[in-house]
């Protein structure tokens, strides 16, 4: 298997509501057959009905709620951008689950949950500089493979 991710699909209870939330954050998507696709750098973020996603994956869905063990993240270029994005997310209907604060790695980050409870971290990390196009490259930590 190649070491890359092509799509991240979020199972949502209401596709129109979820799309409106992400569009209030400035994202622009395309809807095809009740599925919304957002180009997100070199991959796509997809919104699809939670029931359809579970059925397609061949699993039972116990329902939303609780921590799903996954957090999406967006690294930004400054502390101020962290604060601005968390405020924009709250204004768009997100719940800020952790206000921005200093991190153990010398950065600054906070978290929010979208209307379906999907968690996002917004972080400024001086050890992970971003390219002009926003691309993040994992630095060489000097660790053995």
Image (cartoon, grey):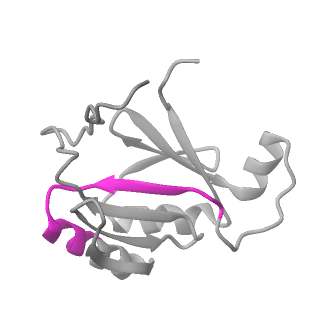
Answer left or right for 106 relative to 43: left
Viewer-nearest residue: 93 or 73: 73
Residue at x 22%, y 45% (from the top left corner): 128
Is 86 magenta? The answer is no
In which quadrant will I find the C terminus?
top left
- Which region shows up in magenta? 68-85
Classify 135 as above or below 96. above
The residue lying at 21 percent from left, 43 percent from top is 134
To which quarter of the image does residue 12 belong? bottom right
Name the quarter where the N terminus is drawn.
Answer: top right
Q: Quadrant of residue 84?
A: bottom left
Of 121 and 34, the residue lying toward us: 121
- Expressed as whole percent of the image width and height from the top left, the position of residue 77 reads 15, 55
Question: Image point 21% across, 62% down: which residue?
Answer: 106
**Horizontal placement of 136 versus 15: left or right?**
left
Across and down, in percent, residue 29 comes to: 42, 49
Q: How many labels, in total?
A: 0
Q: Quadrant of residue 89?
A: bottom left
From what the image shows, is residue 49 above or below residue 13?
above
Where residue 45 appears, x then y in whole percent? 48, 45
Up/down of 110 relative to 28, above or below: below
Residue 116 against residue 91 in the figure, above or below = above
Q: Position of residue 19 (x, y in %)?
A: 49, 61
Residue farthest toward the top in the current orientation of the protein: 1
Seen at 55% across and 69% down, the residue is: 17
């Amino acid at each position: 298997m190649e070491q890359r991710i092509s799509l991240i699909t979020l199972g949502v209870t209401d596709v129109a509501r979820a799309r409106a939330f992400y569009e209030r954050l400035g994202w622009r998507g395309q809807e095809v057959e009740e599925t919304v696709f957002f180009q997100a750098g070199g991959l796509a973020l997809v919104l699809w009905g939670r029931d359809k996603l579970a059925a397609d994956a061949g699993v039972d869905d116990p329902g939303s709620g609780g921590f799903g063990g996954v957090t999406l993240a967006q690294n930004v270029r400054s502390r101020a951008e962290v604060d601005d994005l968390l405020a924009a997310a709250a204004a768009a209907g997100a719940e800020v689950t952790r206000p921005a604060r200093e991190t153990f790695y010398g950065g600054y980050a906070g978290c929010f949950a979208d209307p379906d409870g999907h968690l996002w971290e917004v972080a400024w990390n001086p050890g992970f500089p971003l390219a002009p196009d926003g691309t993040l490259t994992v630095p060489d930590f000097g660790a053995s493979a």
